[in-house]
Image (spheres, rainbow, N blue to C red):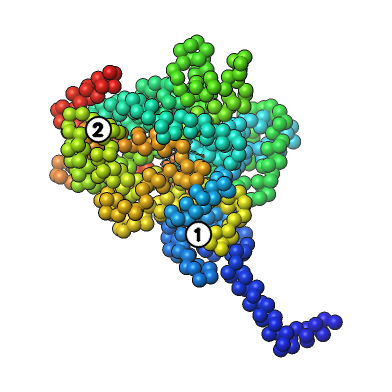
Amino acid sequence: MGLSLLSWFLSMENAFGAAIFLSAILAYRTFSPSSNNLPPGPKPLPIIGNALQMPTDQMEEVFTEWGAQYVQKPGTETILGDVVYARVFAQPMLVLNSLQAARDLLDRRSAIYSDRPRFVLLSELFVIYLFLVPRLPYLSLKYDNFRMGWSSASTHYVCLLLVPLYAHLSLRPSGPRFRKHRRFINQVFNHRAVAAFRPLQKKETIILLEAMSQTPDSFVDHFRRYAAGTILKITYGYDVVSVDDLFVQLAERAGTLTVEAGSAAANMVDFFPLMRQASCICLKYRTTNIRGNIRHIPTWAPFSTFKIKALECRKAVEAMMDIPFEQVKTDMRSGTAVPSYTSTLLDDHRDSDGSIAPEDEEDIKGSAGTLLAAAEDTTIASMHTFVLAMVLNPHEFKKAQEEIDMVVGQHRLPNLDDRPSLPYFDCVLKEVLRWSPMVPLGMPHRLMEDDFYRNFYIPKGTIVMANIYAILRDCNEPDVFRPQRYLDDETLPDPLGVIFGFGRRICPGRHLAEASYWTMAAAIVSAFDISKVLDEHGNEVGNPKYEFTHGFVRPPDACPYLFLFFYYFIHHSRSHPKPFKCSIKPRSSNFSNIINQARLELDS
Ligand code: HEM
């Protein structure tokens, strides 16, 4: 039977038929969407996929290079390498290197591209360990002791300030509670509503200028104070006095500890399906009320250092969330609360008997903590980058100053009403954001169902990153700092439409952030001369260079397992200039009059 089949198949006629059949299959596979037709990308190795090719530093640059390198021609259409696919162990990922691709997928298909990846580490890793704990007689640990605090009932959130602390809004799967948080935040931070914060931004700007005139070398601290001062006032009605304030310190500590606890090794659970499953089982297990204390963990126990750090971290994050929140509640009870995001939402969610559902309370607390975390570091990074750009490009600084002088004069500070009359200054601000975007890879989205794009198959669960850095380099001479490009070519995408991300996950604080950026930068250009520091021989000192660090994350030497790059990938989300010195001097003896005048205007 077998032989006769073979001879049939080999007969010339049928071989010809089979060839047509095979060609048809081949053509189908080549030209039609299919699960084998993945987007181009570096060749994966068995099991580990592209783990070894993954960059551990300057990822956005490497992903941009991949874009040029991995080009495919599906059908007749030539696809530029703007969509690059890679796989790390079982985790598929897609990098979008063009605005077109980011808009097509993250904006137009945002219904399925708005999930966040699930990061076991920051919220659930410890339960794996705990799965074993109840079985060990000397260990009795409460599940909650092992979560790092960011995964409370409110939405998972990638904390931009501290490190992406994927536990609240930003990591929350797209769903009803994610939408609830976005609704809360949009209510207060929508385009129209943020106009109410202008007096606060003005007040903080005056404080910033005064501080910069007194201790110019600490300019980054002064930006920190501005950022904390605005967001803490808006969120909790709290007046920041200095960066040493309790609430500011709480946020700093939570961030630092989260990074330390976020050891790379722990993130392996995200790559190994088995461990992921174990984590899920353990999550269900968490309802078991296991009591205990971290001190009982023996030092030889696997991950014990990590767990101790994690507990510390959890406490810090909880303190950051709880203390300001409880303060607002106390003030509300005593009738001394200043209207704020938190107090308004608490009032809105009060039942007729004055009580608030625990879930609502948890959501209000979580989203408030999220705002504090998200706003601070990005605001600092934008201003830090602005100052670096001005130091390195003195002629552009002068041009911006001349325009402001011409329109505003030198006797008052510019305000947002002047913005339409300062087109060149606006271009300078855009160019700074293009030159070094604060969040170069945006924040990761997760595809919620299988999809096809330009005939390519993109599997469900793929982590999708918009390469904001690459998108903004799609112009002539991208390395050159040239604000004029925006006046010469109106088709260039406005960085303000790119740096805040895409789709349903677009940064909800963007209107506030944009207004703060403009207000601070305009006031600084108007009030100060900024330049390089020269020593007595006229040599440049202070090291201002186009060099950036990424967030709080330490370089790979801190990571014992190179293949666990993903930790870095996700956490390399923010870009700050490397520390540098510059000279910042008030432009005129009129400086204090201008400040006094601005104060008077504010009080009137
Ligand atoms: C220059 C300043 C800022 C930049 C560059 C920035 C950038 C971003 C980016 C790229 C994302 C991710 C968007 C995406 O997933 O596609 C994001 C998310 C977020 N940002 Fe901002 N941001 C800034 C300031 C702020 C401020 C001032 C606030 C709060 C008032 C804020 C609150 C948030 C929140 C809550 C999210 C999470 C949204 C979600 O996951 O649904 N951001 N931001």
The answer, for residue 142, to whether it is visible in the render is yes
Query: What amino acid type is highlighted by mark number 2?
Result: Pro
Q: Nearer the viewer, residue 82 or 184?
A: 184
Q: Residue 182, how many percent across, how many down?
A: 52, 35
Left or right: 443, with 582 as reference point: right
Left or right: 47, with 389 as reference point: right
Q: Is mark 1 within 8 Å of ligand 1?
A: no
Counting labels gives 2
| Mark closer to the observer (1, 2) | 2
Question: How would you rate the neighbour count of disc 1 (Cα within 10 Å): few for under 14, some for 14-19, many for 20 or more?
Answer: many
Question: How would you rate the neighbour count of disc 2 (Cα within 10 Å): few for under 14, some for 14-19, many for 20 or more?
Answer: many
| Quarter that holds the C terminus | top left
Which residue is under mark 2? 414
Query: What amino acid type is highlighted by mark number 1?
Result: Val
Q: Calculate the distance from the C-alpha at mark 1 to the C-alpha at mark 2.
A: 44 Å
Which residue is under mark 1? 84
Left or right: 287, with 483 as reference point: right
> Residue at coordinates 21% horizontally, 29% vertically from top-left?
412
Q: Residue 592, how many percent across, how many down?
A: 19, 24
Q: Nearer the viewer, residue 558 or 394?
A: 394
> Residue at coordinates 54% horizontally, 50% vertically from top-left?
109
Q: Is residue 266 above or below residue 226?
A: below
| Quarter that holds the N terminus | bottom right
Q: Is residue 441 above or below residue 65?
A: above
> Residue at coordinates 44% horizontally, 17% vertically from top-left?
338
Using the rendered view, name the quadrant where residue 152 is placed.
Answer: top right
> Residue at coordinates 68% horizontally, 77% vertically from top-left?
21
